[in-house]
Image: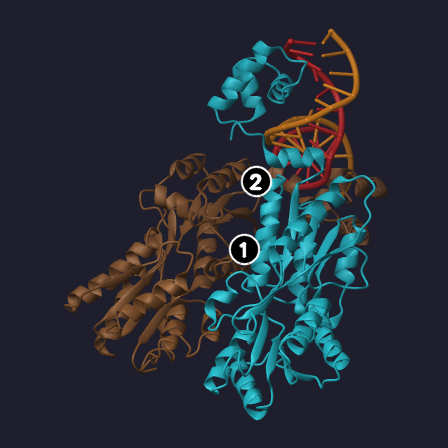
Chain colours: A brown, B cyan, C red, D orange
Amino acid sequence: MTTLKELSKLLNLSVSTVSKALNDSHEISDKTKKRVHELAAKLNYKPNRIAQQLKSNRTKTIGVILPTVTNPFFAEVLHGIETEATKNNYDIIVCLSDEHLDKEERSLELLSNGSVDGFIMAVARESQVKSKTEHLEKTLNQGLPIVLFDRVVKSISCDKVIVDDFKSVYEATKYLIDKEERKEILLISNIEELSVGKLRTKGYKTAMSEAGLKPRVLNLGQSPDVEAEVYNNLSNYPEIDAVVSIDHITGIVAINMARKLGRAVPEELSVIGFGYEHTQLVSSPKISIIHQKAYAIGEMAMKTIIANLTLEAYEVKTQVVPSELKLSESTKKA
Amino acid sequence: MTTLKELSKLLNLSVSTVSKALNDSHEISDKTKKRVHELAAKLNYKPNRIAQQLKSNRTKTIGVILPTVTNPFFAEVLHGIETEATKNNYDIIVCLSDEHLDKEERSLELLSNGSVDGFIMAVARESQVKSKTEHLEKTLNQGLPIVLFDRVVKSISCDKVIVDDFKSVYEATKYLIDKEERKEILLISNIEELSVGKLRTKGYKTAMSEAGLKPRVLNLGQSPDVEAEVYNNLSNYPEIDAVVSIDHITGIVAINMARKLGRAVPEELSVIGFGYEHTQLVSSPKISIIHQKAYAIGEMAMKTIIANLTLEAYEVKTQVVPSELKLSESTKKA
DNA sequence: TTGTATGCGTTATCAT
DNA sequence: ATGATAACGCATACAA
């Protein structure tokens, strides 16, 4: 890699003159500027980023810690984060916690050494279940800002970008009750222990109780055979006339199992799931979803961390990205 | 952030003594080491990574440039890359080309300024279609190694990690011919213009021609309505008795459309697709897949770039990660 | 055993 | 208009 020193030698100029010339300082004559720029271009000179970072004490790099990236929700969030980062000349260092607390702690620790200016993260399942937050506090106390998204920790004071979990499921449930006249609505969950799972379930239960209906919750936990469990539940309770799934998998499973049981979707059974980009493509009939704007969440998280790092008097806040009910073929009135 | 200088002041020692003590140099007395370590721990001292990078002229950071991360194949590869990186104390800076040549060029250019020690990448669709490789050559010429995976550029001399695209599809097709006695086998493709698409198609065509069968290829390109196209093709050619899909979506679509047409899977129609982690969960019957070991590909790519950066006399090579035919419910004999 | 000096590449301040 | 010097934080060769 070409350095300022090399350029200065070849041009018989001092390093500082070359530096100023490249930065278009008014102190430097046009003639010199031209000479410098020409040689720099010829030798493909690029200022060493690491040296700049050391000098400025800013990396323009954000640490992004995700529980997983094979879940399409997080993949899309990452897409939004990356796009917004690129737009603002930021880099992102990506770490995956694999839903484990210790990996999350380790990533945070390892990057809190000047590698990044701040973090965007969704906490690991394990961290949320165990309510461990010391590592987050410690990072914040070191002066590194954090933007939490989706899976959020209430007790911590930092920026948050969340989804309207309660409201979206409440309204979807209400839609099934009011518009589709469903009464025996089953909620399927495999994320009961997560904050978002609790909120979504609450939305469902509230809508049900307001309508005087009895809630039914099928909690799959981390079950190895999701299909069998859904099949059995639908089979054992033939009175079920609608399903609300609060993740991106079990809604499609419900559609598939309903068909196996000879239950027509949507005539006999309405299904609403959660979804993202490609979800709708791979179910038949196409599943109606609560569409989380994952990309927008990523964008907003990145915008927020940059604002925090850039603005003078910055106050942390919680922002909500509304979801959208996208009706398709698995509900009656599309 | 605490620095060596601060520690040295508080301890009345020189910076270099503190540095050596923290690095457990034999030159330093145990007593001093103890004092230093204690204060360092108390003040949560961590050596500034940027300064170390500048000093050592190595970042221990790899640039990872992916076409997209919402495709589960790339998401899983990323998972493998990240895990192996963490294991070796490397960081990854992730950039997404969104399948565009210019974004790919830009990312490569921007990170070739000392930010990373090397790259792992799969080239964008556009780059591959246009056969643009100058940006790759340029990067290699600057002394930055690249590991290409999956979508590979033949003409370029660098490490490559590829899948046995030809062989896996050849064998899957042969399986349908020999074991399931299928004769009218349709290949569905939406990646015809990619190197991997060509190879997979060639595997299919070779198996067909060896068996004296007529190939049928449904090339979807970037069609907006995949379902309709698949539906129409299956409908127009009722003699089709098997489908080989060479991506992770259209196999499932074929299963769904077959059902719409009242064609029993697998009795009347066998289907084999491509798949990764969650693919099998969301089709009914469960789809038989050529399972690409995406995670293993990521691991191997990372191991390879580290070897290249670490080993003295390193020779670039091409490594093949074999796929596995995973039979399930969409073929007759599981 | 400890300390001094130097340099990584850049930029900013202060001469000339 | 140009150049010398210092500094970011760290690590190492070289004194003492």
Cα distance between the residues tagged 1 and 2: 16 Å
Residue at x 23%, y 74% (from the top left corner): A239
Mark 2 is on which residue type? Ser
**Whether labels 1 and 2 share one chain:** yes
Q: Is residue A216 left or right of residue B25?
A: left
Q: Secondary structure at mark 2?
A: loop
Label 2 crowd bin: few (<14), some (14–19), many (20+), radius 10 Å? many
Can see residue B113?
Answer: no
Residue at x 43%, y 50% (from the top left corner): A122
Task: Using the image as rendered, state which of residue B277 and residue A138 is in the foreground.
Answer: B277
Q: Is residue B107 left or right of residue A32?
A: left
**Which quadrant would the C terminus of chain B be assigned to in this image?**
bottom right
Q: Secondary structure at mark 1?
A: helix
Disc number placed over residue B236 in the picture, else none: none
Can see residue A148?
Answer: yes
Task: Using the image as rendered, state which of residue B211 and residue B306 is in the foreground.
Answer: B211
Q: Earlier in the sequence, mark 1 or mark 2?
A: 1
* Occupied quadrant, residue A156: top left
In the rendered view, tell whether residue B30 sits above or below residue A82.
above
Task: Identify residue for label 2.
Answer: A115
Task: Identify residue for label 1.
Answer: A85
Name the subunit of mark 2: A
Name the subunit of mark 1: A
In the rendered view, tell whether residue B28 sits above or below residue A88.
above
